[in-house]
Amino acid sequence: MILEFTKMHGLGNDFVVIDLVRQRAFLDEITVQRMADRHFGIGFDQLLIVEPPEDPTADFKYRIFNADGSEVEQCGNGARCFARFVYESQLTYKTKIRVETKSGIIEPELGGNGWVRVNMGEPKFLPEQIPFLADAPQALYPLQLTELEIKIDVVNMGNPHAVILVDDILHANVAAIGPQVESHERFPERVNVGFLQILSRNQARLRVYERGSGETLACGTGACAAVVSGIRRGLLDHHVNLELAGGTLNIQWQEGDVVWMTGPTAKVYEGRFDLRYFQG
């Protein structure tokens, strides 16, 4: 079976996007893993699937799979690429669309020069909403790792995030701490891990160790979670430029409101592959 795909990225967070509105296919966990392999497959951080909506108020259904084949609830950089893809593929002529995700409805809006603004919904903080095992809600939670104890904030932005404040992201031990936090027993569904450095009231830097993918060049929901955490701690104002390895996102949030994320997208190439090569 031949499938068409599009390779895209948002600040270097790279995706393969497949239209399953006009095509038909079933992609299981092993198939996704083989497709994600950067030596023997196509290579991507996440696979984005476009499907017809189940919700009658939505324009599309959006499914996201990590490189390890696990399906996740949300991906902010992916949401921007998704919006540009369905518009440029003429699946819709709307510049503002309603998209059904595993975590609820989001509303991306296309601007000029490939930039997309996304209503990412309201953040959630209660331990059971992450999910995170804790006796009671706290501003910060101590988390015991193999050789040290750290303090984390927890935020659900459609998927779970732990945010760690660091002095300098260049010297943060992401490779050691990221995997320990991601798979910590207190996160029953694992977690994305953000390392946040505050530069000023309106400027910050971030590195993210993503659940199921490892460290990536950018993470949209991670960016939202980090800025929300910084605002809740009184360290950031409500409009923040957040620098990631792949570029800068603009994040806006007022307590009690939704989070708005604005950033660029890029289309890299289009291709076709025989699905049989990746199936088990």
Image: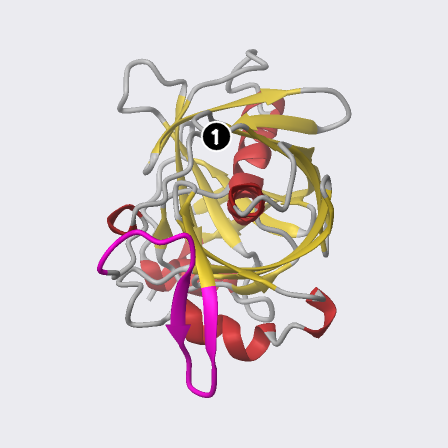
- Mark 1 sits on what residue? 255
Residue in the picture at 39% in, 71% down: 143
- Asked whether the viewer can see residue 40, the reply is yes
Q: Foreground: 125 or 193?
A: 125
- Magenta residues span 135-151
**Residue drawn at x 43%, y 58% as measured from the top left:** 140
163 vs 190, nearest the viewer: 163
Q: In which quarter of the image is residue 264?
A: top right
Q: Residue at x 43, y 19 (%)?
A: 98
Indicate the position of residue 279 as horizontal and vertical percent values.
Answer: 36, 61
Is 48 above or below relative to 20? below
Spot occupied by residue 211 in the image (x, y as percentages of width and height): 44, 61
Which of the two residues, 7 or 66, is positioned nearer the viewer here?
A: 66
Q: Above or below — where is 182 with respect to 76?
A: below
For the C terminus, the quadrant is bottom left
Picture quadrant where residue 116 is located: top right
